[in-house]
Image (tube, rainbow, N blue to C red):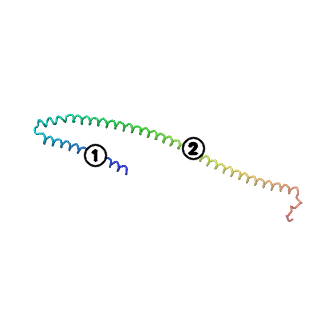
Amino acid sequence: MHMANDSFRHAFGDLLRLLGLGLVALLAWAGTLLLAVRFLPDWEARGQFGDLFGSVNALFSGMALAGVVYSLYLQRKEIQLLREDLVHASEGQKQTLLLSREQSRHQKASAQLASINALFSYHQQQLAQARLDQDTVLIRASKAELAALQRHLETFLPNEQPKGSVA
């Protein structure tokens, strides 16, 4: 908002200067007319006096043409600066696009690594559970083998009582 307000003040100041310059030119023209009427008694003298300002007319026309040429020069420079700014902005956008694509690739790789890590953790848990299940099976098998061995020994030694047992 502050920038727009400054721009408005600048434009308004330029307009006031232009109106002031136009008013000065109008007053100079009117003053010349009043002086010519007051101090030059007849129309012939007034006409000769007016012819003196033909060169001033040409001068002002030349200055107006120079002003137009200078404004065209300024517009050309401004357009050239705008083109350069556009080129820089375009290059900046290209760099931003490249960085965005690279960031996207990094995010994709990070997501893939996270999913591989999750799969690895899952399989590690499954492997630990399988080992636990295998150990449980081995313990049960060992108990069953021990019981079978004990029965087998009892068949060979039927008369002996194991210690701690009552007959």
Q: Is residue 69 left or right of residue 43?
A: right
Residue at 33%, 47% in the rendered image: 10
Residue at 13%, 41% in the rendered image: 39
Q: Are marks 2 and 1 in contact (CB under 8 Å)?
A: no
Quadrant of image for the C terminus: bottom right
Tell which residue pokes out farthest to the front in this image.
Answer: 39
Q: Is residue 24 left or right of residue 148?
A: left
Which x, y percent locates residue 133?
Answer: 71, 52
Residue at 27%, 44% in the rendered image: 18
Q: Secondary structure at mark 2?
A: helix
Residue toward you, 118 or 58: 58
Residue toward you, 101 or 5: 5
Which x, y percent locates residue 162?
Answer: 86, 61
**Res 24 seen here:** yes
Tell which residue pokes out farthest to the bottom in this image.
Answer: 166
Residue toward you, 64 or 165: 64
Which x, y percent locates residue 95?
Answer: 48, 40
Q: Secondary structure at mark 1?
A: helix
Residue at 12%, 39% in the rendered image: 40
The first of marks 2 and 1 along the sequence is 1
Tell which residue pokes out farthest to the right in this image.
Answer: 159
Report crowding for label 2: few under 14, some 14 to 19, many 20 or more residues within 10 A (C-alpha): few
Q: Is residue 142 left or right of residue 128?
A: right
Report crowding for label 1: few under 14, some 14 to 19, many 20 or more residues within 10 A (C-alpha): few
Which x, y percent locates residue 63?
Answer: 26, 36
Mark number, residue 32: none
Give the Cα separation between the discs numbered 2 and 1: 64 Å
Residue bearing the label numbered 2: 109
Mark number, residue 17: 1
Give the residue type that dot 1 points to.
Arg
Give the residue type that dot 2 points to.
Ala
